[in-house]
Image (cartoon, grey):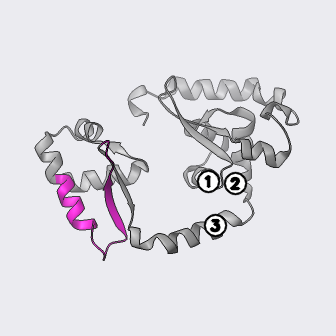
Amino acid sequence: MITTQLEAILFASGKPVTRAALKKSLDVSDEILAEGLADVKLRFNSESSGIHLVETEAGELQLASNPSCAEVIASMFKQEAAGELTRPSLETLTIIAYRGPITKPEIEQIRGVNCSLILRNLLMRGLVDERDDVSKLQPVYSVTADFLRHLGIHTASEMPGFEELHGNEKIGKMLEELAASTPVESLP
């Protein structure tokens, strides 16, 4: 059971997770956690598996692709990043440009759909940046200098209609309602 829960947490997080966070989330002892992680490593860390459990020097754990698959993965991402942006990607990028820094739930509140894959694609392309925001207790997204350079501007505030959209009261109220209805415990 612990192995299944560990796999699910590591898969869903999409970024490194500390042993302390895993221990707290699963409410288990160090020994039980170590046994579960050993099981996950035994199942995945082999040449016949496309997924491996990696651990950093700082003790953070993450599911990652098998290092032997690096070439094929790089090729796929290169193809994915080389194409034109889709309409949903452009919508998401526009929201980030006009309302950023903004959280994933806030973007999804505005768009009305899950944006996980779109955000990953925009991050890969170097058009948006993700950083932790202590006040919001989760990552926020902003446009990068590369994005601004592509548009030929110095700051996002130079975009057409920026003041009107950045400070739009209807959108601001909608995001405030989202923040008020989201309990702190449910944030990542």
Residue at the image position 32 percent from the left and 56 percent from the top: 54
Q: Residue furthest front?
A: 57
| Quarter containing the C terminus | top left
Q: Secondary structure at mark 3?
A: helix
Tell me residue 61's x, y (percent): 32, 49
- Magenta segment: does it hold 41? yes
In the rendered image, the vertical position of residue 104 relative to residue 174, given as above or below? below
Front-most of residues 119 and 68: 68
Q: Residue at x 71, y 33 (%)?
A: 99
**Amino acid type, callout 3:** Glu
Residue 1 is at least partly visible in this image: no
Q: Secondary structure at mark 1?
A: helix
The residue labelled by disc 2 is 88
Which residue position holds label 1? 118
Queried whether the magenta region covers residue 35, the answer comes back as no
Query: 112 or 140: which is nearer to us?
Result: 140
In the image, 29: left or right of 15? left
Q: Nearer the viewer, mark 1 or mark 2?
A: 1
Pointer 3 with pointer 2, Cβ within 8 A:
no
Label at residue 80: 3
Compute the Cα span from label 3 to label 2. 15 Å
Report how far apart the C-alphas of labels 1 and 2 lie in the structure. Answer: 7 Å
Horizontal and vertical percent for residue 25? Answer: 27, 38
Q: Is residue 150 left or right of residue 40?
A: right
Q: Residues within 10 Å of mark 2 (few under 14, many from 20)?
A: few
Residue placed at 57% from the left, 71% from the top? Answer: 76
Q: Which amino acid, mark 2?
A: Pro
Q: Earlier in the sequence, mark 1 or mark 2?
A: 2
Say if mark 1 contacts mark 2, CB within 8 Å.
yes
Residue 63: quarter of image: bottom left
Disc 1 marks which amino acid?
A: Ile
Is label 1 in contact with label 3 (beta carbons under 8 Å)? no
